[in-house]
């Protein structure tokens, strides 16, 4: 069985509940604060933006949250997703370690994002919401929510980070195909966008800016709610279907990971694959490592500060306890647009602070080298975001081989790169360049923060 390449599950094995890691954390995440008073906020403060069912999940400390049958029914379009033993990659690396990957690129949107887009659209539908507004970086989240909104007959409006809007046109076409309206952000449609353009007419945009625009639209229209594809507690929880399935698949393979790896933008990808395994670490003392991999151009986990900060650029959201580079930080225009976010979710920030999880930062050329190796040995062209996980896998196998030990490594192949071929074209032609933010730029961005520090 250990040499079996594909490890599958039956449809009946789709998880019936999401796992809420907060229930097992010794140190719970600190509460969000009101942006003006800096006092802890209650669920009522989130009511203008989210349906109450999602707010209840956001603040819940229950360990298991039941997945509605309607959501599981739509999950069954592509779930359970397959897991593979990466025998070709292992052979190419000449490693004695075993490498497994969970492949989320089989979803209609081509990534893991529909795992939370569908329940978010469902709960909005149940409360009679007519329209949802959101942001998207590289377009994976925007396309996932567009798909989900179409399933429930909800209008969808998306503010897409400008550098991705211009560089990844087919992501926009996907969203349009599912009926969404898509705007390049910063735009002249909102006060937030206009204020950014007034300062920098050529701004490439950022996820923080796009969030500001989407939140503004939702907050100023009674028929509209806001939806976020990462960072928040309920979003991370929805993604745990990935790791819950992965645990069953590892059991079928007669194996268990020493290391679990995923790319890191705001946290949903990483949380999805790692949290169910971290349950074993928190509850049973299992010695499993969880490594979040971010770009060197946006290194909030490895070089940021743990403090309260806004989730958006303009400062419209509640203050979140996070590892951050500062909400005004504008990352370099790397191709992994989904990882260009200034901060990290509160749960993962607390886990990192407590030493429960680890983080690494890798430049994009090393990531694309790893992605090319993977595509030529395993057949799937990975999304630029997923390349970060693969690059870390390569690092970990080399380290294990150097130490003369064999490790079992699991990573989340969060999506395919079929709409990112322009990035691969740049890599193949030698035009791709690395971006590594200077400490001076990080210090400058953090110095602009006037938000509460965390002791």
Image (tube, rainbow, N blue to C red):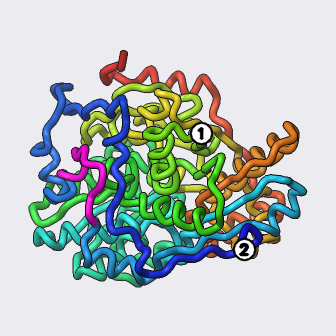
Q: Residue at x 45, y 43 (%)?
A: 200
Q: Is residue 19 left or right of residue 161?
A: left
Q: Residue at x 81, y 71 (%)?
A: 376
Q: Secondary structure at mark 1?
A: loop
Query: Where is residue 117 drawn, in percent x and y?
Result: 35, 67
Mark 2 nearby-residue class (10 Å; few <14, some 14–19, many ≥20): some
Q: Which of the two residues, 109 or 260, is positioned nearer the viewer here?
A: 260
* Image height of 322 relative to 427, above or below: above
Q: Which residue reaches farthest top?
A: 455
The quarter of the picture where the N terminus appears is bottom right
Q: Which mark is residue 5?
A: 2
Q: Which mark is residue 287?
A: 1
Q: CA distance from mark 2 to mark 1?
A: 25 Å
The magenta region covers: 56-66
Query: Where is residue 423 drawn, in percent x and y?
Result: 69, 64
Q: Earlier in the sequence, mark 2 or mark 1?
A: 2
Q: Is residue 93 left or right of residue 223?
A: right
* Image height of 91 relative to 177, above or below: above
Task: Inspect the magenta stretch and tell me whether residue 63 lies in it.
Answer: yes
* Image height of 414 relative to 291, above or below: below
Query: Where is residue 106 drawn, in percent x and y?
Result: 54, 77
Query: Where is residue 221 drawn, in percent x and y?
Result: 13, 60
Marks 2, 1: nearer the viewer: 1
């Amino acid at each position: 069985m250990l040499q079996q390449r594909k490890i599958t599950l039956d449809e009946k094995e789709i998880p019936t509940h999401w796992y809420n890691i907060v229930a097992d954390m010794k140190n719970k995440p600190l509460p969000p604060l009101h942006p003006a008073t800096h006092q802890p906020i209650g669920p009522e403060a989130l009511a203008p933006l989210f349906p109450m069912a999602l707010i209840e999940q956001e603040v819940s400390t229950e360990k298991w949250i039941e997945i509605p049958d309607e959501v599981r029914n739509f999950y069954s379009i592509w779930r359970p997703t397959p897991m593979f033993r990466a025998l070709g990659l292992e052979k190419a690396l000449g490693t004695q370690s075993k490498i497994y990957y969970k492949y989320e690129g089989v979803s209609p949107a081509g990534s893991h994002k529909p795992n939370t887009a569908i329940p978010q659209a469902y709960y909005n539908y149940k409360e009679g919401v007519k329209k949802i507004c959101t942001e998207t970086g590289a377009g994976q989240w925007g396309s996932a929510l567009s798909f989900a909104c179409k399933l429930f007959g909800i209008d969808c409006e998306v503010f897409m980070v400008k550098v991705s809007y211009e560089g990844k046109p087919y992501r926009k076409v996907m969203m349009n195909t599912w009926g969404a309206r898509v705007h390049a952000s910063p735009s002249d449609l909102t006060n937030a966008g206009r204020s950014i353009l007034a300062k920098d007419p050529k701004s490439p945009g950022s996820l923080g800016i796009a969030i500001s625009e989407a939140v503004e639209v939702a907050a100023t229209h009674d028929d509209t709610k806001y939806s976020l594809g990462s960072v928040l507690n309920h979003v991370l929880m929805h993604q745990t279907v990935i790791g819950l399935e992965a645990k069953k698949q590892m059991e079928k393979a007669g194996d268990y990971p020493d290391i679990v790896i995923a790319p890191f933008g705001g946290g949903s990808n990483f949380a999805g694959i790692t949290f169910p395994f971290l349950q074993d670490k928190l509850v049973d003392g299992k010695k499993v490592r969880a490594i979040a991999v971010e770009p060197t151009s946006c290194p909030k986990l490895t070089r940021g500060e743990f403090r309260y900060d806004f989730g958006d650029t303009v400062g419209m959201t509640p203050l979140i306890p996070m590892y951050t580079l500062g909400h005004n930080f504008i990352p370099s225009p790397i191709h992994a647009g989904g990882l260009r976010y200034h901060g990290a979710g509160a749960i993962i920030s607390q886990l990192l602070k407590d030493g429960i999880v680890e983080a690494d930062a890798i430049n994009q050329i090393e990531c694309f080298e790893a992605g090319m190796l993977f595509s030529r040995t395993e057949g799937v062209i990975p999304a630029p975001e997923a390349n970060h996980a693969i690059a870390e896998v390569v690092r970990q196998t080399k380290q294990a081989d150097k130490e003369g030990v064999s490790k079992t490594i699991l990573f989340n192949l969060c999506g395919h790169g079929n709409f990112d071929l322009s990035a691969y074209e740049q890599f193949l032609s030698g035009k791709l360049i690395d971006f590594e933010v200077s400490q001076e730029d990080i210090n400058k961005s953090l110095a602009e923060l006037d938000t509460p520090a965390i002791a």
